[in-house]
Amino acid sequence: MPNLLHLDSSVDPTNSRSRAITRTFADAWRQCSPAHTVTYRDLHSAPLPHFPDPWLHWPARVRPAEAVVAPDAEALRDSLIAELCAADVVLIGAPMYNYSLPSTLKAWIDYIHIPGITALYDGNVQPMAGRPAVVVNSRGAMYDVGTPTEGWDHGTPVLDLILGSSLGMTMRNITANLTLADFVPMLADFIDRGNDEFAQAHAAAAALAVELGSA
Ligand SMILES: Cc1cc2nc3c(=O)[nH]c(=O)nc-3n(C[C@H](O)[C@H](O)[C@H](O)COP(=O)(O)O)c2cc1C
Protein backbone atom coordinates (compact mmCIF):
# COMPACT_ATOMS: atom_id res chain seq x y z
CA MET A 1 0.00 0.00 0.00
CA PRO A 2 1.56 3.35 -1.01
CA ASN A 3 1.72 5.46 2.12
CA LEU A 4 2.14 9.23 2.39
CA LEU A 5 3.51 10.81 5.56
CA HIS A 6 1.96 14.29 5.67
CA LEU A 7 3.42 16.83 8.10
CA ASP A 8 2.16 20.38 8.68
CA SER A 9 3.86 23.00 10.83
CA SER A 10 2.13 26.33 10.21
CA VAL A 11 0.90 28.07 13.37
CA ASP A 12 -2.14 29.23 11.42
CA PRO A 13 -4.93 26.63 11.54
CA THR A 14 -7.32 28.44 9.17
CA ASN A 15 -5.66 30.66 6.55
CA SER A 16 -2.35 28.88 6.13
CA ARG A 17 -1.26 28.57 2.53
CA SER A 18 1.16 25.73 3.19
CA ARG A 19 -1.64 23.76 4.88
CA ALA A 20 -3.95 24.43 1.94
CA ILE A 21 -1.34 23.27 -0.58
CA THR A 22 -0.37 20.14 1.36
CA ARG A 23 -4.09 19.33 1.70
CA THR A 24 -4.43 19.54 -2.10
CA PHE A 25 -1.52 17.13 -2.46
CA ALA A 26 -2.87 14.70 0.14
CA ASP A 27 -6.37 14.76 -1.38
CA ALA A 28 -4.95 14.01 -4.85
CA TRP A 29 -2.83 11.22 -3.35
CA ARG A 30 -5.88 9.59 -1.73
CA GLN A 31 -7.67 9.74 -5.07
CA CYS A 32 -4.90 7.76 -6.79
CA SER A 33 -6.47 4.53 -5.49
CA PRO A 34 -8.26 3.13 -2.45
CA ALA A 35 -4.92 1.61 -1.42
CA HIS A 36 -3.19 5.00 -1.14
CA THR A 37 -3.01 5.82 2.56
CA VAL A 38 -2.04 8.97 4.47
CA THR A 39 -0.43 9.24 7.89
CA TYR A 40 -0.96 12.77 9.22
CA ARG A 41 1.02 14.63 11.85
CA ASP A 42 0.33 18.24 12.86
CA LEU A 43 3.57 19.44 14.42
CA HIS A 44 1.96 22.68 15.60
CA SER A 45 -1.17 21.40 17.32
CA ALA A 46 0.66 18.34 18.68
CA PRO A 47 4.24 19.59 19.11
CA LEU A 48 7.07 17.24 19.90
CA PRO A 49 9.15 17.95 23.00
CA HIS A 50 12.52 19.54 22.37
CA PHE A 51 15.20 16.96 21.75
CA PRO A 52 16.23 16.04 25.32
CA ASP A 53 19.58 14.25 25.22
CA PRO A 54 22.71 14.38 23.01
CA TRP A 55 23.09 10.60 23.11
CA LEU A 56 19.70 10.22 21.51
CA HIS A 57 21.34 11.51 18.31
CA TRP A 58 23.16 8.15 18.07
CA PRO A 59 22.13 4.49 17.94
CA ALA A 60 22.31 2.67 21.28
CA ARG A 61 24.95 0.32 19.84
CA VAL A 62 27.54 3.12 19.52
CA ARG A 63 26.93 4.89 22.85
CA PRO A 64 29.41 4.51 25.69
CA ALA A 65 28.30 2.28 28.55
CA GLU A 66 27.77 5.23 30.88
CA ALA A 67 25.36 6.97 28.50
CA VAL A 68 21.85 6.58 29.86
CA VAL A 69 18.95 7.74 27.72
CA ALA A 70 15.40 8.06 29.04
CA PRO A 71 13.43 5.09 27.66
CA ASP A 72 10.36 7.18 26.85
CA ALA A 73 12.46 9.64 24.82
CA GLU A 74 14.10 6.80 22.91
CA ALA A 75 10.70 5.21 22.30
CA LEU A 76 9.37 8.48 20.88
CA ARG A 77 12.42 8.84 18.63
CA ASP A 78 12.08 5.27 17.40
CA SER A 79 8.36 5.64 16.74
CA LEU A 80 8.96 8.80 14.66
CA ILE A 81 11.66 7.03 12.67
CA ALA A 82 9.36 4.04 12.14
CA GLU A 83 6.62 6.41 10.96
CA LEU A 84 9.08 8.00 8.54
CA CYS A 85 10.37 4.68 7.22
CA ALA A 86 6.80 3.48 6.63
CA ALA A 87 6.32 6.33 4.15
CA ASP A 88 6.80 5.94 0.42
CA VAL A 89 6.52 9.71 0.05
CA VAL A 90 7.00 12.43 2.68
CA LEU A 91 5.06 15.71 2.37
CA ILE A 92 6.10 18.65 4.55
CA GLY A 93 4.38 21.99 4.98
CA ALA A 94 7.29 24.30 5.79
CA PRO A 95 6.43 27.99 6.20
CA MET A 96 9.29 30.47 6.43
CA TYR A 97 9.58 31.79 9.97
CA ASN A 98 12.35 34.31 10.58
CA TYR A 99 14.14 33.21 7.44
CA SER A 100 14.18 29.66 8.75
CA LEU A 101 11.94 26.73 9.68
CA PRO A 102 9.20 26.57 12.32
CA SER A 103 10.77 25.32 15.54
CA THR A 104 8.22 22.49 15.62
CA LEU A 105 9.52 21.18 12.30
CA LYS A 106 13.11 21.55 13.48
CA ALA A 107 12.22 19.42 16.52
CA TRP A 108 10.96 16.66 14.21
CA ILE A 109 14.21 16.80 12.23
CA ASP A 110 16.21 16.42 15.44
CA TYR A 111 14.35 13.14 16.15
CA ILE A 112 14.58 11.58 12.69
CA HIS A 113 18.09 12.54 11.58
CA ILE A 114 20.09 9.83 13.33
CA PRO A 115 23.47 8.77 11.90
CA GLY A 116 23.66 4.98 11.88
CA ILE A 117 19.87 4.61 11.70
CA THR A 118 18.56 7.00 9.02
CA ALA A 119 21.83 8.55 7.84
CA LEU A 120 25.35 7.41 7.04
CA TYR A 121 27.66 6.71 10.00
CA ASP A 122 29.44 3.34 10.04
CA GLY A 123 27.75 1.56 7.20
CA ASN A 124 25.53 2.08 4.23
CA VAL A 125 22.39 2.86 6.25
CA GLN A 126 20.00 5.14 4.42
CA PRO A 127 16.53 3.56 4.57
CA MET A 128 14.86 6.56 2.94
CA ALA A 129 17.29 6.76 0.01
CA GLY A 130 15.57 7.46 -3.28
CA ARG A 131 12.14 8.12 -1.79
CA PRO A 132 10.57 11.50 -2.59
CA ALA A 133 10.29 14.33 -0.06
CA VAL A 134 7.89 17.07 -1.14
CA VAL A 135 8.48 20.38 0.66
CA VAL A 136 5.79 23.07 0.46
CA ASN A 137 7.43 26.35 1.33
CA SER A 138 5.20 29.38 1.99
CA ARG A 139 6.79 32.74 2.64
CA GLY A 140 5.46 36.21 3.20
CA ALA A 141 7.91 38.05 0.98
CA MET A 142 10.04 36.96 -1.98
CA TYR A 143 13.63 35.82 -2.33
CA ASP A 144 14.29 36.02 -6.06
CA VAL A 145 17.70 35.44 -7.58
CA GLY A 146 19.35 38.77 -8.27
CA THR A 147 17.41 40.72 -5.62
CA PRO A 148 18.73 41.96 -2.26
CA THR A 149 16.93 39.11 -0.43
CA GLU A 150 18.47 36.33 -2.52
CA GLY A 151 19.96 33.72 -0.18
CA TRP A 152 17.95 34.81 2.88
CA ASP A 153 16.04 31.51 2.98
CA HIS A 154 17.77 29.43 5.65
CA GLY A 155 14.89 26.96 5.98
CA THR A 156 14.60 24.98 2.77
CA PRO A 157 18.40 24.59 2.46
CA VAL A 158 18.35 22.75 5.82
CA LEU A 159 15.68 20.37 4.55
CA ASP A 160 17.72 19.82 1.37
CA LEU A 161 20.77 18.98 3.48
CA ILE A 162 19.05 16.69 5.97
CA LEU A 163 16.46 14.91 3.85
CA GLY A 164 18.32 15.12 0.54
CA SER A 165 22.04 14.89 1.24
CA SER A 166 21.98 13.05 4.56
CA LEU A 167 18.97 10.73 4.18
CA GLY A 168 19.36 10.44 0.41
CA MET A 169 15.79 11.38 -0.42
CA THR A 170 14.77 12.93 -3.73
CA MET A 171 13.71 16.50 -3.05
CA ARG A 172 10.73 18.08 -4.77
CA ASN A 173 9.96 21.68 -3.79
CA ILE A 174 6.79 23.70 -4.22
CA THR A 175 7.04 27.38 -3.26
CA ALA A 176 4.40 30.06 -2.71
CA ASN A 177 5.99 33.48 -2.27
CA LEU A 178 4.38 36.79 -1.32
CA THR A 179 1.69 35.27 0.84
CA LEU A 180 1.55 38.54 2.80
CA ALA A 181 1.38 40.85 -0.23
CA ASP A 182 -2.23 41.78 0.55
CA PHE A 183 -1.36 42.65 4.15
CA VAL A 184 2.09 44.28 4.13
CA PRO A 185 1.83 47.75 2.51
CA MET A 186 5.29 47.68 0.92
CA LEU A 187 4.39 44.43 -0.90
CA ALA A 188 1.12 45.78 -2.30
CA ASP A 189 2.46 45.86 -5.86
CA PHE A 190 2.87 42.08 -5.72
CA ILE A 191 -0.64 40.98 -4.72
CA ASP A 192 -1.39 39.48 -8.14
CA ARG A 193 1.91 37.61 -8.21
CA GLY A 194 1.28 36.21 -4.73
CA ASN A 195 -2.16 34.98 -5.77
CA ASP A 196 -0.76 33.51 -9.00
CA GLU A 197 1.98 31.65 -7.14
CA PHE A 198 -0.60 30.25 -4.71
CA ALA A 199 -2.76 28.98 -7.58
CA GLN A 200 0.26 27.52 -9.37
CA ALA A 201 1.40 25.81 -6.18
CA HIS A 202 -2.00 24.10 -5.84
CA ALA A 203 -1.83 22.89 -9.43
CA ALA A 204 1.76 21.71 -8.98
CA ALA A 205 0.83 19.85 -5.79
CA ALA A 206 -2.10 18.06 -7.42
CA ALA A 207 0.02 17.07 -10.44
CA LEU A 208 2.95 15.91 -8.33
CA ALA A 209 0.69 13.76 -6.15
CA VAL A 210 -0.60 11.97 -9.24
CA GLU A 211 2.96 11.58 -10.60
CA LEU A 212 4.35 10.17 -7.36
CA GLY A 213 1.22 8.20 -6.58
CA SER A 214 1.45 6.46 -9.95
CA ALA A 215 5.15 5.62 -9.68
C1 LIG B 1 6.78 33.84 13.40
C2 LIG B 1 6.73 34.25 11.95
C3 LIG B 1 7.89 34.64 11.30
C4 LIG B 1 7.86 34.96 9.95
N1 LIG B 1 9.03 35.26 9.31
C5 LIG B 1 9.03 35.50 7.98
C6 LIG B 1 10.25 35.76 7.29
O1 LIG B 1 11.34 35.74 7.83
N2 LIG B 1 10.18 36.00 5.95
C7 LIG B 1 9.00 35.98 5.26
O2 LIG B 1 9.02 36.18 4.06
N3 LIG B 1 7.83 35.74 5.90
C8 LIG B 1 7.83 35.51 7.23
N4 LIG B 1 6.66 35.24 7.89
C9 LIG B 1 5.43 35.15 7.08
C10 LIG B 1 5.13 33.72 6.68
O3 LIG B 1 6.22 33.12 6.01
C11 LIG B 1 3.92 33.68 5.79
O4 LIG B 1 2.81 34.26 6.47
C12 LIG B 1 3.59 32.28 5.33
O5 LIG B 1 2.50 32.33 4.45
C13 LIG B 1 3.28 31.38 6.52
O6 LIG B 1 2.87 30.11 6.08
P1 LIG B 1 1.35 29.66 6.14
O7 LIG B 1 0.61 30.55 5.17
O8 LIG B 1 1.37 28.26 5.72
O9 LIG B 1 0.85 29.84 7.55
C14 LIG B 1 6.65 34.93 9.24
C15 LIG B 1 5.47 34.57 9.91
C16 LIG B 1 5.51 34.23 11.25
C17 LIG B 1 4.23 33.81 11.93
Image (cartoon, rainbow, N blue to C red):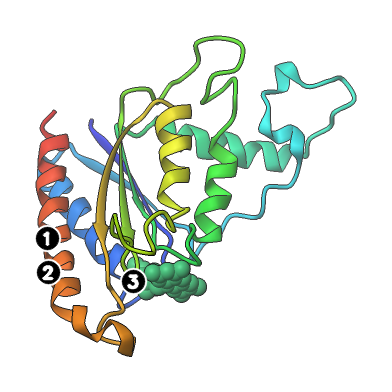
Using a 10 Å C-alpha cutoff, classify the residue at mark 2 as few (fewer than 14 neighbours), some (14 to 19) or many (20 or more): some
| First reached walking from the N terminus: tag 2 or tag 3 | 3
Q: In which quadrant is the C terminus drawn?
A: top left
- Where is residue 190 shown, x and y percent of the image? 20, 78
Q: CA distance from mark 2 to mark 3?
A: 14 Å
Q: Is residue 21 visible?
A: yes
Q: Are the residues tagged 2 and 3 within 8 Å (C-beta)?
A: no
Outermost residue on the right side: it is 66
Seen at 54% across and 58% down, the residue is: 104
Outermost residue on the bottom side: it is 185
Q: Which residue is mark 1?
A: 200
Q: Which residue is mark 2?
A: 196
Mark 3 secondary-structure assignment:
loop
Left or right: 10 in relation to 132? right
Seen at 50% across and 67% down, the residue is: 98
Mark 2 secondary-structure assignment:
helix
Q: Which residue is mark 3?
A: 141
Asked whether 147 or 44 is in front, the reply is 147
Q: Are the residues tagged 2 and 1 within 8 Å (C-beta)?
A: yes
Mark 1 secondary-structure assignment:
helix
Please tell me whether residue 97 is drawn above or below residue 65 in the rendered image. Answer: below
- Where is residue 167 shown, x and y percent of the image? 45, 28
Left or right: 5 in relation to 195? right
Asked whether 184 or 164 is in front, the reply is 184
Q: Is mark 3 within 8 Å of ligand 1?
A: yes
Seen at 59% across and 20% down, the residue is: 116
